Image (cartoon, rainbow, N blue to C red):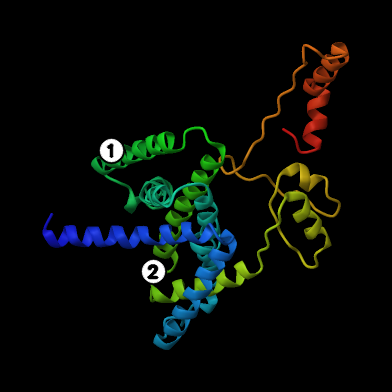
Amino acid sequence: MSTRGWALFAAASVIWGIPYLFIKIAVDEISPSVVAWSRLALAAAVLLPVAWKLGALRGLRERWRILTVFAAVEMAVPWPLLGFGEVHISSSLAAILVATVPLFVALLATRFDHSERPTATRLVGMLIGLAGVVALVGIDIGGKRDELLGALAILVVAFLYAIGPMIVKRRLSDVDPLGPVAASLGIADEVRAKVRNFPNGATSMREMAAATGHPIGCTQATEILATPGIRLVAPLPRGLDLETTYTAAVDARAADPGVARDFVARLTSPQGRAQRQALGFG
């Protein structure tokens, strides 16, 4: 590689990494949702007028559906997740995990875009990179639950980032690239303005039940099923959900171990399982 190539590579690395450092500093003081909304608002304020002036927004009105999807997977969903993840992990690890985007692109390409399928050599290189990421997460995080959750959030961000370019290539490749980005910033900013965070799931469900219109929300199934006026639509896809494991045991010093054992047996019986599932427990 030439000196110029190395210089450009170094510059790209610095430009790539700086935002994650600033996000990490920001989420130490303010909530991830506010950080995400601020990023969207500032970007929309800068890019929308420029795109309008250059005529890059022409022809996008009839494509509002795909633009909404693009805004969701590139901005409205991943930016708050990125801030949430950086509450729990370092900015350097966050940047490295986001760099797994090409791995997810290669994975998606096997199903949706054959032209993006990696060659055998590139696939080997990607697998080596994946092994490095797995090793890094295992060494840097270990079994710390909060940090693992933060790392998972960042990996979801990387997966969503991989979807965005494929949408542009398949559905928006015939328009000025500035147009979809600027329009999506406006859509994402509008979406973020309507998002509300609550300290716990029970509070969020009560607020949803009392709200007008048709709000949507996400919390654990037990709290959804326990709230009148709220309907459980579906669980999150496997891999994006969070499971809690409950353990039942009888203490050797229990005052009435027979009753305790009967209770545990009832919990684990087929009838008990059916009752648990009806209440949202697996």
The label on residue 38 is: none
Q: Earlier in the sequence, mark 1 or mark 2?
A: 1
Q: CA distance from mark 1 to mark 2?
A: 30 Å
Circle 1 residue:
124
Mark 2: few/some/many CA within 10 Å (<14, 14-19, 20+): few
Q: Position of residue 71 (x, y in %)?
A: 52, 66
Residue that extends furthest to the front in the rendered view of this protein? 29
Identify residue for label 2. Answer: 173
> Who's the residue at 32% across and 41% down the image?
129
Left or right for 167, reference 131: right
Q: Amino acid at mark 1?
A: Val
Image position, residue 31 (x, y; %): 59, 60
Q: Name the side, left or right, on which 168 lies relative to 83.
A: left
Q: Residue at x 77, y 48 (%)?
A: 224
User: Which SS class for mark 2?
Assistant: loop
Residue lying farthest bottom? 53
Question: Compared to 22, does 177 lie above or below?
Answer: below
Task: Give the side of residue 70 with respect to residue 226, left or right.
Answer: left
As rendered, which of 183 and 211 lies closer to the eye? 211
* Most distant residue in the left direction: 2
Residue at x-position 26% and y-position 44%:
122
Question: What SS does tag 1 mark?
Answer: helix
Give, as a three-letter code, the residue at label 2. Answer: Ser
Instruction: Give the vertical position of 44 relative to 138 (above or below).
Output: below
**Residue 186: image x %, image y %?**
54, 75
Select label 1 or label 2 by which is in front: 1
Judge whether 138 appears above or below 151 on screen. Answer: above
Query: In the image, what residue occupies the spot 75% across and 35% down?
Result: 281
Quadrant where the C terminus is found in the figure: top right
In which quarter of the view is residue 193 placed? bottom right
Q: Please tell me whether residue 157 is drawn above or below residue 124 in the rendered image.
A: below
How many residues crowd mark 1 within 10 Å: few (<14), some (14–19), many (20+)? few
